[in-house]
Amino acid sequence: MLGAGWTEVAGFAAAFAIAVVATPAGISGAVLLLPFQVSVLGTPSPAVTPTNLLYNVVATPGALYRYWRQQQTGGHLALVLIAGTFPGVIAGSVIRVELLPGPMVFDLVVAAVLLPLGSWLALTRPAPEGRSRARRIRVPALIVLSAAVGCVGGIYGIGGGSILAPILIGSGRPPREVAPAALASTFVTSLAGVITFTFLAIDRHGFVAPDWPTGIALGLGGLAGAYAGASIQSRLPERLIRRIVGFLVIAIGARYLWSGLG
């Protein structure tokens, strides 16, 4: 655990670097900040979850604004994702505090999902445009999927967009459409998660509420990094973005596998 003051400085720098890489793929960066908070910053559990969600609340508006200037709003897809992830993240927040306040065996389940998915994205080529549209997930199924992902996001503090982005890209949607929609969903659901954890902390002892100084420092670093990352997204080929998403998901899955086995 770092000393006073250095925690915020280290968090800002790490969040900036991670957001630059993650944002073009539609990922907020919180997925990689969670293990960084635990291992380097020493953020206690379960407060690390709402602190990560607070990062999303502060960091994602920069990327969303940049996408808006590029006329990428996510449109109908963003509304569909929010309809599912919003109630899901509230349920996940309650589960995190009431049932899973400490280290979670569920890490193995998450790893079992993310590792194959990340490998598929990283090692396969994008499908032809015609086939991609035929494989797209229908709206009712996407809402149910978003609710489940939002619940997992509420437990782990990743909003949900980080898991939805590779699934949507893998189903054939272009990263240009997925990235702003996933980030919009992440912002709304993370805000709901932070509010939920804050209320849950009122009548409980221990570390339940967000670590506000750390979360804000992380968010400001992510805000600058996400704006920079969004500005280069249109210059990157779709195959490269797919590889970035895949390897990020593999890294996340490997971390959860290591934690679960430990």
Image: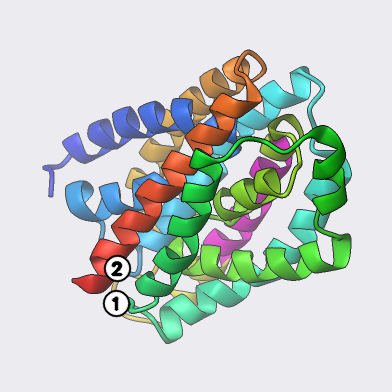
Q: Which residues are magenta?
A: 180-195
What whole-number distance in Å separates the C-alpha atoms at marks 1 and 2?
6 Å
> Label 1: few (<14), some or many (≥20) within 10 Å?
few
Query: Which secondary structure type mostly characterizes the magenta part of the structure?
Result: helix
Inspect this view and state whether residue 28 appears: no
Estimate the x, y position of residue 254 in percent, counting from the top left: 32, 55
Amino acid at pointer 1: Gly
The residue to which callout 1 is attached is 102
- On-image quarter of the C terminus: bottom left
Residue 5 colored in magenta in the image: no
Q: Earlier in the sequence, mark 1 or mark 2?
A: 2
Q: Please give the label number shown on residue 86.
A: none
The residue to which callout 2 is attached is 45
Query: Does residue 16 lie above or below 119 as drawn?
Result: above
Residue at the image point whose x is 48% and y is 23% from the top? 224
Query: Does residue 107 lie above or below 238 as drawn?
Result: below
